[in-house]
Amino acid sequence: MTDLSGRRAVVTGGASGIGEACARAFAAAGAHVVIADLNGEAAEQVARAVGGEAWQVDLGDTGALADLTLDADILVNNAGIQHVRPIEQFEPERFSLILRLMLESPFLLIRAALPGMYERGFGRVINISSVHGLRASPFKSAYVAAKHGLEGLSKVTALEGGPHGVTSNCINPGYVRTPLVEKQIADQARLHGIPEDEVLPKIMLTESAIKRLVEPAEVASLALWLASPEAGMATGASYVIDGGWSAR
């Protein structure tokens, strides 16, 4: 069993979905977990449940992160939102927000955490990307652009961090059973002109060999391994957990 005793993990978007699953897995392995989330009340609830601490933070406000110092042995960049629109209807301010939240803030958090990781000679940066970091889908220009950028950021972090004992990797799930995915169903139904109960089989799961949603705990189990001492040679990679989607 992975032992993270004495390690401090910061998980963004840690109050629900994949982030919460990662926080619980890390805490069960002995880490002290910081639940970073815009929803302070939800972050407090998860923090109490895992014996960690809450950090209410608006990661879309990147100006407030510019001078941040972050004490973390493990950093999980997970926070994200989705917005489904054709490019010609995509609101520029929403595009900018998604890029700030899902690409700029991971850069700023990595930047804030690396000095401490370098000093200790150990660090794990785990970026929750997506199959959309490797593939594209229509109507998701900002999300796909942000995830593709996160892939590149993760690889540069791996190259710079390697000599200092720091690894950096992406996890690339398909559609995960989270509130983020559930909120997309109505938008997808409207855009494609189909009933909501047809979105999963006809839109979301068409490319997957395994016809079900990924469970948050499945993503967390991979994150837990990447955070472990045993994963010291795993860096600069993208670990796909998409039911076979990207095999096409």
Image (spheres, helix red, strand yellow):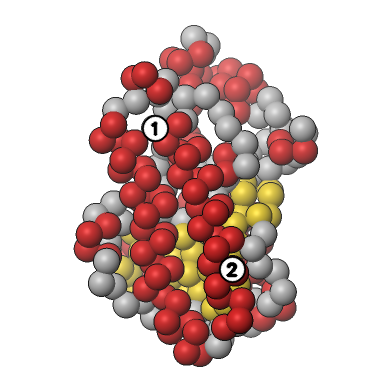
- Residue located 42% across and 27% down the image: 84
The quarter of the image holding the C terminus is top right
Q: In the image, 106: left or right of 229? A: left
* Disc nearest the viewer among 2 and 1: 2
The residue beneath circle 2 is 158
Q: Quadrant of residue 40?
A: bottom left
The residue shown at (60%, 22%) is 203
Residue depicted at 26% across the width and 35% down the height: 93
Residue at horizontal 43%, vertical 68%? 110
Label 2 close to label 1 by CB (< 8 Å): no
Q: Residues within 10 Å of mark 1 (few under 14, many from 20)?
A: some
The image shows residue 163 at horizontal and vertical percentages of: 61, 81
Residue 156 found in image quarter: bottom right
Question: Any mark on residue 83, and which?
Answer: 1
Q: Position of residue 116 (x, y in %)?
A: 43, 84
Residue type pointed to by label 2: Ala
Between 80 and 49, the one lying in front of the other is 80
Disc 2 crowd, CA 10 A, few/some/many (<14, 14-19, 20+): many
In the image, is residue 110 above or below residue 199?
below
Q: Earlier in the sequence, mark 2 or mark 1?
A: 1
User: How far from the left and from the top, in percent, is residue 240?
Assistant: 69, 49
* Residue 237 position within the rendered picture, expressed as x and y whole percent measured from the top left: 67, 59
179 above or below 39?
above
Seen in the picture, residue 200 relative to 102 is either above or below; the reply is: above
Q: Secondary structure at mark 1?
A: loop
Three-letter amino acid code at disc 1?
Answer: His
Q: Nearer the viewer, residue 203 or 47?
A: 203
Residue 136 in sight: yes
Depicted 160 relative to depicted 6: above or below = above
What element does badge 2 sit on?
helix
| In this picture, residue 87 sits left or right of residue 192 | left
Quarter assignment of residue 10:
bottom left
